[in-house]
Image: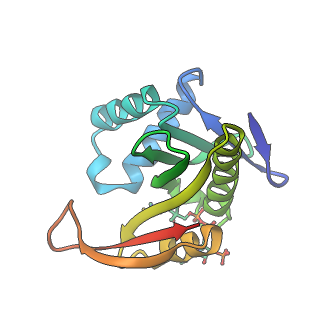
Amino acid sequence: MVMKNDASIYVESFWKGHKTGDFEAVVAIAQESFSGMKNKINATRWLCANLAARPRMQYYIAKYNGIVAGYILWVEHGGFRPEAYLELEQIAVKESFRGKGVGSILIKSSFQNIKKDIEESDRKIKTVKITTGKDNVRAQVLYEKTLGAKIENIVKSPYRNEDIEVEMFVRY
Ligand SMILES: CC(C)(COP(=O)(O)OP(=O)(O)OC[C@H]1O[C@@H](n2cnc3c(N)ncnc32)[C@H](O)[C@@H]1OP(=O)(O)O)[C@@H](O)C(=O)NCCC(=O)NCCS
């Protein structure tokens, strides 16, 4: 499945059948975007484990002029319920491609596709959750604009006690 959103950005479902170069690109983006994912072996193991959990976990990648520019990981919680509970678990755009609309298109296109799949199996989306750093205002604005997510909780980060996170939700 390929979604064309403008002249140069494509969003596509990402899975085991993709070529090695695409895997390496996703791992490299994770490494440069998240402090806890700097280790290449662990970043690769994480990617492989999540890909094996499809369709509970689903990756999409964005290609900008054919180059892998970002990825998003969606997770479904609590079973394949009639009223689905999804989490946007991770999104990252390669540093050199940020601010070009890749993140927005990645969220909107992948969500649209997941929603369609869920509705085709006679289910519907009930809740979407997204957690991000309290200071990551850019990500918060992005989630509000693209999904309509609102901040509901402010919590201590499970990764570092000194960091604060916001939990955002879309409730239908
Ligand atoms: C958050 C992230 C995914 C956004 O991706 P992106 O491709 O840069 O996003 P977009 O270009 O679609 O821009 C989204 C919004 O960010 C804001 N933005 C864009 N460039 C910005 C900049 N230089 N500084 C601050 N905000 C900026 C704008 O509000 C923009 O919306 P608008 O263009 O409709 O006004 C990307 O910055 C990233 O990978 N960050 C590191 C990893 C991360 O923080 N992930 C989320 C953690 S949960």
Residue 66 in percent (x, y) is at 72, 40
Quadrant where the N terminus is found in the figure: top right
Decide: is 118 above or below 86: above
Quadrant where the C terminus is found in the figure: bottom right
Look at the image and name its color scheme: rainbow
Residue furthest out toward the right: 7
In terms of depth relative to the viewer, which is nearer, 32 or 37? Answer: 37
Decide: is 44 above or below 30: above
Decide: is 146 above or below 14: below
Q: Residue at x 34, y 77 (%)?
A: 153
Residue furthest out toward the left: 161
Q: Residue at x 71, y 45 (%)?
A: 116
Q: Residue at x 44, y 78 (%)?
A: 151
Would residue 110 be found to the left or right of residue 126 on screen? right
In terms of depth relative to the viewer, which is nearer, 126 or 95? Answer: 126
Residue 77 in percent (x, y) is at 41, 47
Q: Residue at x 60, y 43 (%)?
A: 61
Image quadrant of ligand 1 equals bottom right
In terms of depth relative to the viewer, which is nearer, 66 or 74? Answer: 74
Would residue 143 be found to the left or right of residue 122 on screen? left
Residue 62 in percent (x, y) is at 65, 46
Residue 54 in percent (x, y) is at 49, 30
Q: Exactly how many numbered labels are in the figure? A: 0
